[in-house]
Amino acid sequence: MPEIFDFTTFPTLTSERLVLRAPEPDDAADLFVWRSDPVVQRYNSEPMREVAEAAALIAELRREYADRRAIHWLVTLRDDDRPVGLFGYVGWAPGHHRADVGYDLRRDHWGRGIATEALDLLLRFGFDRMDLNRVEAQTIADNHESVRLLERLGFRRDGLRRSYSLEEDGTYHDGAIYGLLRHEYR
Ligand SMILES: CC(C)(COP(=O)(O)OP(=O)(O)OC[C@H]1O[C@@H](n2cnc3c(N)ncnc32)[C@H](O)[C@@H]1OP(=O)(O)O)[C@@H](O)C(=O)NCCC(=O)NCCS
């Protein structure tokens, strides 16, 4: 088995179309594009109003990596270094061989398989280099794009938290918990 990842060098990941790299302070304006989009942020925090909020988020993502608490990757296309998505492992519990994933993508890049390709890179890295046995994802149950993404990669629904979050439409939405185990990953 390859060496377990130890945070000393940032793990840039590459696939046919994508390069997943570390967030840099200069990425704030690009991150702001999708984090200020109310459709992308529908099931997440309030849309950002100023680029300074994106800069603060990037500083926090970098701090979490430096503190060895999380790994956040910006998604770029091979021929363009400007980021279009943010994917990451948060809540890594090495003793239990388990971590949670989170992801979002600029809206004009939806529907091209970019999220599938990016999440697959994270999965391969997680099972190979972080020695994970379980990857977990929590999503609002009627976030159809997110649910389709998880199911396409083999995640199974482990449970449902009824009326888990109050969304901006003023109603409670169920929260779904998805898991993918190492032996289920192709
Ligand atoms: C969740 C999210 C990242 C999914 O993005 P996405 O573009 O739907 O996912 P993919 O990039 O994998 O694209 C899949 C779609 O592209 C199509 N597609 C085109 N080319 C493809 C390819 N080469 N490979 C796979 N799918 C491809 C698929 O058919 C699929 O379409 P469908 O959903 O109509 O079946 C995106 O909707 C998002 O950012 N949402 C807002 C943030 C969010 O809710 N995050 C989750 C919080 S828990």
Image (tube, rainbow, N blue to C red):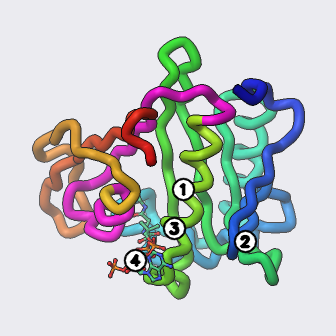
**Camera-side mark, 2 or 4:** 2
Secondary element at image label 1? helix
Between label 3 and label 4, give the one nearer the viewer.
3
Q: Residue type at mark 4? A: Val
- Quadrant hosting residue 7: top right
Residue that label 4 marks: 39
Q: CA distance from mark 3 to mark 4?
A: 16 Å
Cβ at disc 2 under 8 Å from ligand 1: no
> Badge 2: how crowded within 10 Å, few (<14), some, or many (20+)?
many
Q: Nearer the viewer, mark 4 or mark 1?
A: 1
x, y percent for residue 56: 72, 53
Numbered label attached to residue 120: 1
User: Mark 1 and mark 2: span between their CA atoms?
Assistant: 15 Å
Q: Amino acid at mark 1?
A: Asp
Residues at marks 3 and 1, CA–CA distance in whole angstroms? 8 Å
Where disc 2 sits, the SS reads: strand
Q: Dot 1: few (<14), some (14–19), or many (≥20) neighbours within 10 Å?
A: some
Gap in angstroms between the C-alphas marked 4 and 1: 24 Å
In the picture, the disc for residue 76 is 2
Q: Which residue is mark 3?
A: 115
Q: What amino acid is at disc 3?
A: Ala
Q: CA distance from mark 2 to mark 4?
A: 21 Å
Instruction: Identify the mark nearer the N-term, 2 or 4.
Output: 4
Q: Earlier in the sequence, mark 3 or mark 1?
A: 3
Residue visible at 68% across and 66% down? 75
- Label 4 sits on a secondary structure element that is loop
Q: Secondary structure at mark 3?
A: helix
Say the numbered circle drawn on residue 171: none
Locate residue 45, reporting x and y percent: 44, 57
Mark 3, ligand 1, within 8 Å: the answer is: yes
Magenta span of residues:
128-150
